[in-house]
Image (spheres, helix red, strand yellow):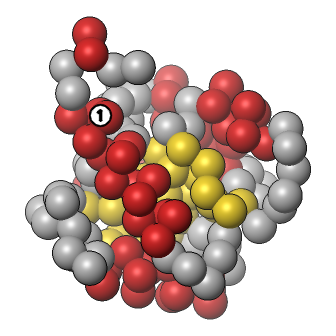
Amino acid sequence: MSSEHPAATVLLVDDDEMDRFLVGLAIAAAGYRVLEAPCAATGLDLARRERPDALVVDCVMPVIDGLDACRTARADAALRDVPIVMLTGLEDPHLAERARTAGADRLVLKSTDAAPLLEALSLALRARSLPAALRA
């Protein structure tokens, strides 16, 4: 699978080392450059320094969870327009709305199938590349 955004850099923020490895591998195999962070604080600092094209953030992390990290990114002028795809292992019917309210572009359930994540990432990148007046 090749990425529609071959030069895009994706910052993956997840406290679980194995999830970071597996998700990072899938994102890299799709043609993206991958940066990784083990927690939200480190991820936000790295995002400010590296200016990635997109963030993939786990919802459930200690200290600062993914929803708070998303809200922080949306409040930061440097990160406000960076697409954010949230990942979750929770099947909570209210989580999608909470993720949208926090500023996430997409919410994806963690799975052994990387296709939904890669599709969400591609859609989020494509939507953010549109002029503001055309974004839905």
Q: Is residue 11 visible?
A: no
Residue at the extreme left: 7
| Residue 7 in sight from this viewpoint | yes
Q: Nearer the viewer, residue 62 or 1?
A: 1
Q: Quadrant of residue 109?
A: bottom right
Q: Position of residue 10 (x, y in %)?
A: 34, 62
> Which residue extends farthest top?
133
Q: Residue at x 51, y 87 (%)?
A: 21
- Decide: is 56 above or below 114: above
| Image-based side of 21 in relation to 135, left or right | right
Residue located at (18% from left, 58% from top):
5
Q: Nearer the viewer, residue 64 or 14?
A: 14
Considering depth in this image, is 58 or 26 the residue closer to the camera?
26
Position of the C terminus, as image quadrant, is: top left
Q: How dense is the environment of label 1, judged by Cα within 10 Å: few (below 14), some, or many (20 and up)? A: some
Q: Report x, y in % for residue 43.
A: 49, 58
Residue picked out by circle 1: 128
x 79%, y 42%: residue: 95
Q: Count of labels shown?
A: 1
Q: Residue 18 at what x, y percent from top left?
A: 62, 89
Q: Indicate whether 30 appears above or below 108.
A: below
Residue at position x 63%, y 31% from top?
A: 100
Q: Amino acid at mark 1?
A: Arg
